[in-house]
Image: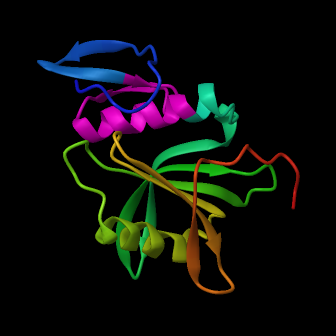
Amino acid sequence: MQKLNFPTFTFRFKNSENKVAIFDEIRKKFIILTPEEWVRQHVVQFLLQEKNYPKSYINVEKLIKINDLNKRYDVVVYQPNGELFLLIECKAPEVKISQQTFDQIARYNLVLKAKYLMVTNGLNHYFCQMDFENEKYVFLKELPEFETTNK
């Protein structure tokens, strides 16, 4: 798999039906390794190891309804009070991050209402803070520390 723009993390792999699978610590199971899954697993390790976000507040690949359509978000991080802290959209490394990518995460966030957004293809990472009042996002240099207080 391609080297990504993340620190080096250790992963568990296994062969499953002639395909390589990677262990997802959050879902507690092996997932077939695709380029997007490679990015998603790096994001999860980045949150756990670099940002010290608690594992119990991280959720991966869950179904949500957007305008009566079933969609799946990649990664979310909750706050202790149950509110969404961070919504992450992962793309495969060969997928360019475009306005369409930001439109997609913005649509998801109309329903989810996360305070922060991250968009990554493993090579380029973009971090935003939501400004709900003015219906826009503000770009940040990096993700904030995890908030344990109920603000």
In the shown orientation, is residue 112 left or right of residue 122?
Answer: right
Q: Nearer the viewer, residue 150 or 143?
A: 143
The correct choice, above or below, for 127 with respect to 129 in the image is: above
x and y percentages locating residue 103 in the rendered image: 38, 74
Residue drawn at (59%, 69%) of the image: 138
What is the tally of numbered marks visible in this picture?
0
Tell me the quarter of the picture where residue 24 sits.
top left
In the shown orientation, is residue 118 left or right of residue 146?
Answer: left
Residue drawn at (39%, 68%) of the image: 102
The correct choice, above or below, for 79 with respect to 35 in the image is: below
In the shown orientation, is residue 76 left or right of residue 10?
Answer: right
Q: Residue furthest bottom?
A: 134
In the shown orientation, is residue 26 left or right of residue 65?
Answer: right
x and y percentages locating residue 32 in the rendered image: 26, 30
Range drawn in magenta: 23-46
The correct choice, above or below, for 15 with respect to 105 in the image is: above
Residue drawn at (34%, 31%) of the image: 4
Q: Would you say residue 26 is visible in this rendering?
A: no
The correct choice, above or below, for 102 with respect to 87 in the image is: below
Q: Nearer the viewer, residue 71 or 142?
A: 142
Tell me the quarter of the picture where residue 21 sits.
top left
The stretch drawn in magenta includes residue 150 = no
The stretch drawn in magenta includes residue 39 = yes
Residue drawn at (69%, 85%) of the image: 133
Give the color scheme: rainbow, by chain, secondary structure or one colour.
rainbow
Q: Quadrant of the N terminus?
A: top left
Q: Quadrant of the C terminus?
A: bottom right
